[in-house]
């Protein structure tokens, strides 16, 4: 009872907090009117834009509602252009003069057009899709059947759109560059948070915008190349607190979820909270890497030979855990007080506690023999992750922009591992803290004759701490332990600091666009390790790099359809340690050639030579320990080692709106010179892995995605095929071992497009195959997974949905099959805001099944059998606000 009262109080506080924020908006000037035809019929879903008279920049846009009425808000009085476009009517452009807080234009009559507008490409309105210029509009009601719960369910039913397993929104196989809510960038890269939590009934319509221009960018004459998806919210869900509160309970399981939104006139706010013991996660490993590893514009980047342990296990393991509790809170805010100021901010918190149980079989190889090692692992980990970011832009006019962005993230974990094998048992405890901070200030101004200047200053700081304690019942790692105490206490710290200043200048010479680039960067990188009893674990490495880059980018037309862009950059490097210093020069060219057969049909070729510098942790002189039998060290990696890689990519894209067919294909080849690999030495109770420079590494990747929607057959077929191959040299006992890795994946699916029908379904099959081949052996794993998903609207209040799949795992020495069935039935209580649900998740796996994975390392194969999250039953109640 106390818990319920406490939760109600928290919910009231959330709502009061949202109401308080939404009340802080400034007064605006409203333009309203009603759009009608020449026969006085209302025109709904007409696109309405208000543009500046001087440069035709759109400052407000929207659509007319079902009775033809539109309402748009702007901040300043003055003269503007009003542009109205509607299917089957001529475009209306008229001048308006705003002199008061309300301008009522009354009835606006559109003239019917007997021919299609020049910028409108349309098959027929019944298709549910209309293409106007660079924007494709969906009439989502044509594809929905009432069973949709959230934005993800809607997107997965729209032709050309889908949400992948990582939560990313894909348009014709490509991840969208921007996610917009009512024309505003709100959720940044947090696709999963948006698609899982925006209720389906809140969505009015969806549009794909090609060549989208960011607010914080100066609009240029050329196309931006960015693709955005805009989600329009229904009027009744704006300017008030909306969302839902959900509580679910099952046997030893619970889920508490709160989603609150306020889409105001000048401020958007979302607050999402989730607590569950079902193992569900609100962020993905891709989200984590996006938040922590911000894109770096430096020409000479940093390459680190990383291990899987460097990433949070609660994200990398997926469902391969016995059980997991997760607690998440996310706050997003977008403030747009005028056409001059926009502020984006978010803060995410995630706490996870999970338990793993694994059986690992490892086959080690030496120059004279091979041997097996079998381990049983029980791993428990508690982790905390927070990331907070702010992005503020001031646009004094269309020719001057100032942007400041800042982000801070922190990851903490406490890991306890119990491990036993044939000969020993041990316990290890690991405490880690990973802190990252970055910020930048950027100024862009546009001069006459298409000249632009951009200046940017940035700073990045990261600090990683790791405390590892290993205790065993007998000696390990071939160490002579004092006083019969078999224990290691190891501390490591990695500190990286980067400060940079770069500038670019855009100008034209005889109509040839050129960009002059320059950048100054200083990087300080320090790695330290310490162990009380063994000096062999002590390291202190320091690298300081000063980098100066100057480059020239040119762009010209080879033909009327083919554009050629080339970039030539020269980099001067000063590389230092405490005792040594080296100066080097690098030349890094790149070029791109793109042929546009049409706006939706192109082919592109790209080549780039990139360089990266090594990190201090790869130049250590002594070893560090990672577990009871593994140590890492350095063979021949030096502070002045430079990794050069040349990458060539070809991409082909074709989208025919009338024929409802699209195809995307990409082929990429990467050849890396002087990459870091490993040199391994194995014995019965230890494995020493040394960082080593190898002459080259080759990587090949290919991908094809296609979708076809039939005209006279209410279904579409989509599928993809990908193949990647990697060839690199690894070493064992200083002997070269060539490792070939191949991965092939593919899927094909049949998706129903039964308009206005109560049933929709999708069925298909996925296949993947991994092959590892080296001088010792060949190991492979295949996964075959047919699936069938369906949603049925039984009555107006009752709906049913389910997903069914079979996963068959087959490796060289083992085989396993997992059946996954997750049904759900929902009931909306009439004349109320309450919805009841009963559902099962993976109900054929009420006990923890096992999943097989294989890995290939320098001198051993690993086959890992992991217990997976158990299925469950649950009933829930949702209250919609």
Image (tube, rainbow, N blue to C red):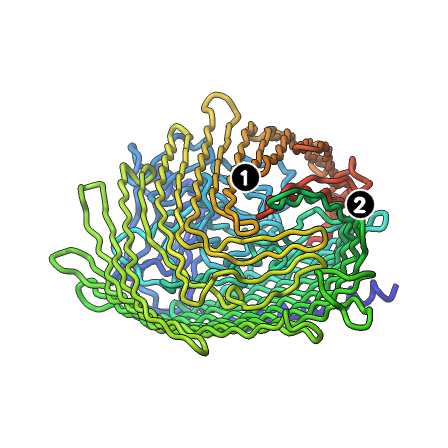
Q: Which residue is mark 1?
A: 774
Indicate which disc, 1 or 2, sits on the residue closer to the N terminus: 1
Q: Secondary structure at mark 1?
A: loop
Q: Position of residue 474 (x, y in %)?
A: 81, 61
Q: Position of residue 125 (x, y in %)?
A: 43, 33
Rendered image quadrant of residue 491: bottom right
Residue 874, disc: 2
Task: Tell me the residue at 75%/62% (across/down).
Answer: 428
| Vertical position of residue 879 compared to residue 599: above or below | below
- Please tell me whether mark 1 or mark 2 is closer to you in this view: 1
Residue 754, disc: none
| Vertical position of residue 380 compared to residue 125: above or below | below
Residue 768, visible in the rendered structure: yes
Check whether the beta carbons of the residues at disc 1 and disc 2 lie within 8 A of each other. no
| Vertical position of residue 87 compared to residue 544: above or below | above
The residue sitting at the bottom extreme is: 578
Q: Residues within 10 Å of mark 2 (few under 14, many from 20)?
A: some
Task: Tell me the residue at 66%/68% (across/down).
Answer: 432
């Amino acid at each position: 009872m106390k818990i319920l009262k406490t939760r109600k109080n928290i919910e009231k506080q959330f709502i009061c907090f949202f109401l308080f924020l939404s009340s802080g908006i400034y007064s605006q000037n409203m333009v309203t009117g009603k759009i009608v035809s020449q026969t006085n019929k209302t025109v709904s879903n007409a696109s309405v834009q208000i543009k500046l008279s001087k440069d035709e920049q759109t400052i407000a846009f929207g659509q007319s509602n079902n009775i033809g009425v539109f309402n748009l808000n702007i901040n300043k009085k003055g003269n503007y252009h009003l542009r109205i476009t509607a299917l089957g009517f001529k475009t209306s452009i008229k001048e308006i003069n705003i002199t008061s807080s309300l301008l009522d234009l009354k009835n606006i009559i559109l003239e019917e057009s007997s021919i299609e507008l020049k910028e409108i490409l349309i098959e027929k309105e019944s298709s549910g899709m209309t293409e106007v210029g660079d924007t494709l509009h969906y009439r989502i009601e044509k594809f929905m059947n009432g069973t949709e719960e959230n934005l993800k369910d809607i997107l997965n039913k729209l032709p050309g759109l889908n949400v992948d397993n990582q939560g990313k929104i894909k348009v014709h196989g490509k991840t969208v560059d921007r996610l917009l809510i009512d024309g505003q960038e709100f959720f940044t890269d947090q696709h999963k948070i948006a698609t899982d939590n925006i209720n389906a009934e809140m969505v009015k319509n969806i549009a794909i915008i090609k060549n989208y221009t960011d607010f914080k960018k100066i609009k240029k004459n050329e196309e931006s190349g960015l693709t955005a998806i805009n989600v329009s919210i229904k009027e009744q869900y704006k300017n008030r607190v909306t969302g839902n509160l959900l509580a679910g309970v099952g046997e030893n399981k619970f889920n508490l979820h709160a989603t609150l939104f306020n889409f105001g006139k000048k401020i958007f706010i979302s607050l999402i909270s989730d607590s569950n013991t079902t193992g569900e996660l609100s962020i993905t490993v891709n989200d984590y890497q996006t938040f922590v590893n911000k894109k770096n514009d430096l020409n000479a980047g940093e390459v680190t030979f990383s291990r899987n342990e460097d990433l949070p296990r609660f994200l990398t393991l997926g469902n391969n855990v016995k059980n997991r509790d997760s607690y998440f809170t996310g706050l997003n805010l977008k403030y747009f007080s005028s056409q001059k100021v926009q502020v984006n901010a978010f803060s995410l918190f995630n706490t996870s506690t999970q338990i793993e149980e694994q059986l690992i079989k490892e086959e080690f190889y030496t120059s004279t023999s091979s041997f097996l090692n079998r381990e049983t692992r029980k791993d428990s980990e508690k982790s905390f992750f927070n990331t907070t970011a702010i992005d503020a832009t001031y646009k004094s006019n269309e020719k001057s922009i100032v942007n400041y962005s800042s982000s801070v993230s922190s990851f903490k974990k406490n890991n306890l591992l119990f491990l036993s094998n044939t000969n020993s048992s041990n316990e290890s405890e690991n405490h880690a803290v990973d802190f990252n901070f970055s910020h930048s200030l950027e100024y862009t101004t546009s001069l006459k004759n298409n000249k632009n200047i951009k200046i940017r200053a940035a700073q990045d700081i990261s600090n990683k701490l790791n405390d590892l304690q290993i205790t065993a019942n007998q000696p390990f790692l071939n160490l002579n332990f004092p006083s019969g105490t078999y224990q290691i206490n190891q501390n490591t710290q990695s500190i990286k600091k980067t400060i940079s200043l770069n500038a670019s200048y855009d100008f034209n010479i005889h109509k040839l666009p050129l960009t002059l680039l320059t950048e100054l960067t200083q990087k300080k990188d320090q790695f330290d390790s310490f162990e009380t009893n063994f000096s062999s674990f002590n390291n202190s490495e320091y690298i300081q790099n000063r980098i100066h880059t100057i480059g020239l980018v040119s762009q010209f037309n080879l033909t009327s359809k083919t554009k050629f862009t080339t970039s030539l950059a020269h980099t001067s490097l000063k590389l230092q340690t405490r005792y040594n210093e080296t100066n080097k020069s690098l030349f890094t060219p790149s070029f791109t050639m793109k042929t546009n057969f049409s706006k939706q049909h192109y082919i592109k070729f790209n080549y780039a030579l990139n360089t990266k510098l090594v990190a201090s942790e790869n130049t250590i002189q002594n070893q560090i320990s990672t577990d009871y039998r593994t140590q890492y060290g350095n063979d021949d990696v030096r502070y002045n080692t430079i990794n050069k890689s040349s990458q060539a990519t070809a991409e082909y894209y074709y989208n025919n709106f009338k024929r409802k067919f699209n195809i995307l294909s990409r082929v990429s080849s990467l050849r890396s010179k002087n990459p870091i690999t490993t040199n391994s030495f194995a014995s019965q109770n230890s494995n020493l892995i040394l960082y080593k420079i190898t002459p080259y590494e080759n990587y090949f990747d290919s991908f094809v995605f296609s979708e076809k929607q039939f005209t006279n057959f209410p279904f579409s077929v989509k599928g993809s095929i990908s193949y990647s191959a990697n060839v690199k040299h690894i070493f064992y006992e200083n002997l070269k071992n060539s490792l070939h890795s191949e991965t092939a994946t593919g899927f094909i699916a049949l998706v129903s497009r039964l308009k206005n029908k109560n049933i929709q379904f999708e069925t298909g099959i996925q296949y993947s195959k991994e092959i590892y081949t080296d001088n010792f052996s060949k190991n492979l794993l295949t996964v075959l997974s047919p699936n069938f998903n369906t949603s049925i609207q039984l009555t107006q209040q009752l709906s049913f949905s389910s997903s069914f799949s079979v996963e068959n795992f087959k490796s060289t020495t083992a085989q396993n099959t997992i059946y996954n069935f997750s049904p759900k039935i929902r009931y909306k209580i009439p004349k109320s805001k309450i919805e009841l649900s009963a559902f099962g998740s993976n109900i054929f796996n009420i006990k923890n099944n096992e999943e097989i994975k294989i890995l290939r390392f320098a001198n051993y194969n690993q086959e890992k059998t992991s217990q997976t999250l158990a299925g469950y039953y649950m009933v829930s109640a949702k209250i919609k606000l």
